[in-house]
Each structure stands twice: as C-alpha cells, then as structure tokens.
Image: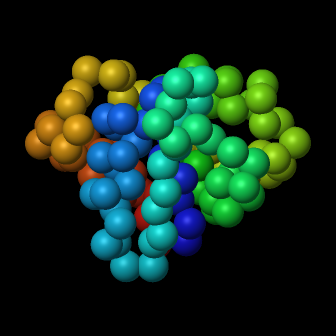
C-alpha cells in the first residue's frame, strides 16, 4: 500500500509520519506539503502514486481538493485532526500518529 502523508510545509508532521511508518510491513510511504513554501510540495505524480492520502488537518484536504481535484479521483483521503503543535519526531506526535493511522494500515 502506498501512503502519502500531507501537512502544510512538509517539515514536521508529515515527515514524521513518513518515517514512523516507513518500515511497516506492506507499506510504502512518502510525504508532501500543501503550502507554496513546502519543502516537498504535493504533485500530481505523488497523488497518483498514493493509494491512501493522509492529511493532518481538514484544511489540507480542502487545499488538495481545490488544487488537484482531477488527480484525486476516487482516492481515499483521511484527515487525522493533528494540529501543528509538534516538533519533528516528538514522542507525543509519534504516539498520536501510531494511534490514529493504525486502523488504515494493512
């Protein structure tokens, strides 16, 4: 399963999620950001690659739908409701991600 994690700037939350689940059996991960100044901006290629798109906040889903509606097709987009209150690999963020994402993993 190819999972794309998305946050605003691809600096803290989505790279953490990408790393946390990178070794999960049967899962390939990538991450991107929806803001113009994202370290790794989302792209049609990443969206087409992804079988599951996991966004950190509802605003990320709205931005994706506005900018990439035709590339999303019938892809599943899940919002975790994780605010930008954490540092990269912060233990609390790692635990929160594990708890919220586990239900969607193979």
> In the image, what residue occupies the spot 62% across and 41% down?
42
Left or right: 13 with respect to 33? left
> In this rendering, would 101 be left or right of 91?
right
Residue 15 position in % (x across, y down): 36, 46
Question: Is residue 55 visible from the viewing direction of this image?
Answer: no
Total labels: the figure holds 0
Nearer the observer, 74 or 65: 65
Specify the quadrant of the image occupied by residue 51: bottom right
The residue under the point 37% across, 79% down is 25
Residue 99 appears at what percent x and percent y?
28, 48
27 is higher (above) or lower (below) than 13: below
Taking the spot 58% from the left edge, 38% from the top edge, the residue there is 41
Residue 92 placement (x, y as % from top left): 15, 37
Q: Residue furthest bottom?
A: 26
Q: How is the image coloured?
A: rainbow
Q: Nearer the viewer, residue 52 or 39?
A: 39
Location of residue 60 in the rendering, given as x and y in whole percent from the top left corner = 57, 27
Q: Residue furthest left?
A: 91
In the rendered image, the quadrant that contains the N terminus is: bottom right
Confirm whether residue 31 shows in the render.
yes
Residue 35 is left or right of residue 13, and the answer is right
């Amino acid at each position: 399963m190819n999972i794309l994690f998305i946050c605003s700037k691809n600096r803290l939350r989505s790279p953490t999620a990408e790393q946390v689940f990178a070794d999960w059996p049967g899962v390939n991960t990538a991450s991107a950001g929806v803001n113009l100044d994202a370290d790794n901006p989302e792209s049609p290629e990443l969206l087409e690659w992804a079988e599951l798109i996991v966004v950190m906040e509802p605003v990320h889903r709205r931005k994706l739908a506005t900018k990439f509606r035709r590339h999303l097709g019938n892809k599943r987009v899940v919002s975790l409701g994780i605010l930008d209150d954490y540092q990269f690999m912060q233990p609390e963020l790692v635990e929160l991600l594990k708890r919220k994402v586990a239900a969607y993993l193979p």
